[in-house]
Amino acid sequence: GENVEQHPSTLSVQEGDSAVIKCTYSDSASNYFPWYKQELGKGPQLIIDIRSNVGEKKDQRIAVTLNKTAKHFSLHITETQPEDSAVYFCAAVTGTASKLTFGTGTRLQVTL
Amino acid sequence: DTAVSQTPKYLVTQMGNDKSIKCEQNLGHDTMYWYKQDSKKFLKIMFSYNNKELIINETVPNRFSPKSPDKAHLNLHINSLELGDSAVYFCASSHLGSGYGYTFGSGTRLTVV
């Protein structure tokens, strides 16, 4: 089955700096890669996603890149703000049953 | 309007009891899921239903029994609760095949004492 690895597990940046979270996946059949933000006491919220036929996607301060050959995808957050502090999960969707396999999460702390 | 809603939000119960968690989605999705998040925040799929039909059944103890009365509802019943069942359980829904629009509920924190 699919295995998704995520690094780093914790990330601390100063407000205004950029943050990068990296993930790798194992199953070349995975075709959709969403990123989720989870705040304390809440469910994961979709913040950006990318399909396997696209290399890069941007939405304001957030961007995602995908390298299918290397099976890598990354989340980039620019001009970080304190409200960006949360746990971020990458994920890969595989197969016709739309099974979502999550990475292990990155706790992002944005300090003033 | 809540897209994926779960009840209850918190559930504290004694070992050996039987409990149920309910989930409803109003997004028009045809597939619903249960995920478990452990104390280390790791999220893992348990079950998936598509139009009331079970399509994913991961290695989960048979004390856990999902039930989907229709494509907008997916419930989770747990028999003979154990301490190790303590976790946050998330319901989610999406369109089958693409996975697009995968949306999660706010979770049910189950504590077994």
Image (cartoon, rainbow, N blue to C red):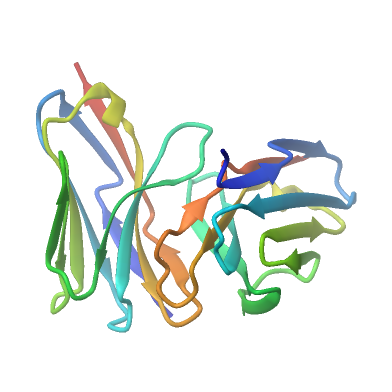
Residue at image x 60%, y 43%? Answer: B107
Q: Is residue B66 left or right of residue B3?
A: right
Is residue A71 visible to the viewer in this orientation of the structure?
A: yes
Residue in front for this viewpoint, A70 or B72: B72
The correct choice, above or below, for A34 with respect to A68 in the image is above
Residue B113 can be seen, yes or no: no
- Kindly identify the residue that appears in the image at 11 percent across and 31 percent down: A79
Please state the horizontal and vertical placement of residue A111, each as a whole percent of the image: 22, 21
Q: Residue reaching furthest top?
A: A112
Q: Identify the image quadrant of residue B13.
A: top right
Q: Is residue A109 or residue A33 the one in the foreground?
A: A33
Residue B27 locus on image (x, y percent): 54, 55
Q: Quadrant of the C terminus of chain A?
A: top left
- Return the x and y of residue A51 as percentages of the image width and height: 25, 69
Q: Position of residue B110 (x, y in %)?
A: 71, 42
The picture quadrant where one finds residue A30 is bottom left
Pick whichever, A61 or A91, lies toward us.
Answer: A61
